[in-house]
Amino acid sequence: MILIKDQYEISILRSIGISKKNIIIQYILRIIMVSFVALVIASVIGNTYGASIVSLLMSFLGASKIDFIINPIMVYLKIPLGYMAVISCVVFIVTRSIKNIKVNQVFN
Amino acid sequence: MKKTILEAIDLSKSFQIDETVSQNILKNTNLKIYDKEFVTIMGPSGCGKSTLLYNISGMDELTSGKVIFDGEVISEEKEKKMADLRLNKMGFIFQQPHFLKNLNILDNILLPGYSNKSEKKRKVRERGEALTREVGIEHISHKEISKVSGGELQRASICRALINEPKILFGDEPTGALNSKATNDVLDLLNNIHQKGTTIMLVTHNVKVAARSQRVIYMRDGMIIDEKSIKGFDYSEEAIKEKEMELSKWLINLDF
């Protein structure tokens, strides 16, 4: 979908000699930056309000107070890295269809 | 002996219309373009001249044939190599100027230069600014794309095509969407660029454009029928008129 919206720009870039690989890298970088910001915001909110929100929800089920036990390496390193790896792979697979956009597609 | 920069051998291109019918756009076309030459290709609509341009510049895939550019066979090269050639050795101008809308004019011009990793950004920027001065658009170089006229945009696209100092400049009807004043400005500019040593190959309908070149190639139905050299580097109004007359006569005899 992103590619359909961007195909005009992509064919301009390709006509001036920017390679497919380069364009795919740009898409991946873009999504990594966005998700990095999202992860930072999410960890801040999670650390300040997370326990109380979950406690509130769980109190309906009878558990009145819940504390989080955080494994920092798991939470701040492995999960974010895994998350980024997964979305990078998805973007890579999706953007491979750039090869179907012909260089001179929009110029005729 | 003049040096050949681009050579096309037995080019064929056919489009599959449906399973049994295919249409041949190019039929065993042979073409040679010499270094530092200014060539135009003329012909009626649908004769395959744009297809020829896109195929020898590697933007489209050939059905059969061979293209040799700057001593290398490029017709079977991989995409990565072709992107590299387009970036460093070829420049393109299209009928309609195409730019990225979220960058201003100067950034659009500099983009191919910045993508070239072997060059310093500062140097690219200097060269880009010099180019905009040369074509007379430095006063609009920080404007947005949508706020500039077509003629200015076309001059900007010439700048973008030249930012990496290409060996050859391809143009597909570069003046097709311009009024006569802007057309003359762009053509003067192309003559200047040519005299500084860049090979130029244009596809056009317009005798005015062809009169600026050194050699005109006439195509019909996917084949090169005839060609004509034009002598002299005089681009004053009278000289061009005379060249146009001469070309028109030739074209009438060819049933243009």
Image (cartoon, rainbow, N blue to C red):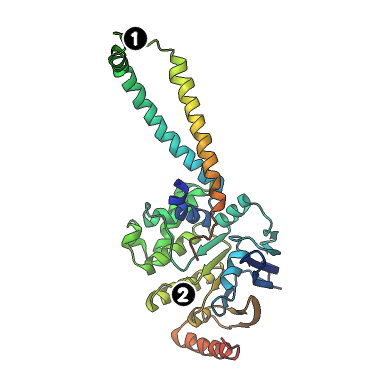
Q: Residue B72 carries which label?
A: none
Question: Residue at horizontal 34%, vertical 67%?
Answer: B149
Instruction: Classify residue B33 as left or right of residue A60.
Output: right
Q: Can residue B133 be seen in this view?
A: yes
Question: Residue at horizontal 52%, vertical 82%?
Answer: B211
Chain of the residue under the numbered disc 2 shown in the image: B
Q: Quadrant of the C terminus of chain B?
A: bottom right
**Of marks 2 and 1, the one in the foreground:** 1
Do discs 2 and 1 share a chain? no
Q: Residue A67 carries which label?
A: 1
Front residue (pair B69, A66):
A66
Q: Which percent across, then down, holds residue B7?
A: 68, 68
Chain of the residue under the numbered disc 1 shown in the image: A
Please tell me whether mark 1 sits on a helix, a strand or a loop: loop
Please tell me whether mark 2 sits on a helix, a strand or a loop: helix
Q: Which percent across, then down, holds residue B73?
A: 70, 59
The CA span between labels 2 and 1 is 75 Å
Question: Residue at horizontal 71%, vertical 73%?
Answer: B1
Q: Which percent across, then down, holds residue B57?
A: 60, 63
Question: Residue at horizontal 52%, vertical 44%?
Answer: A95
Front residue (pair B157, B3):
B157
Residue where numbered disc 2 is placed: B187
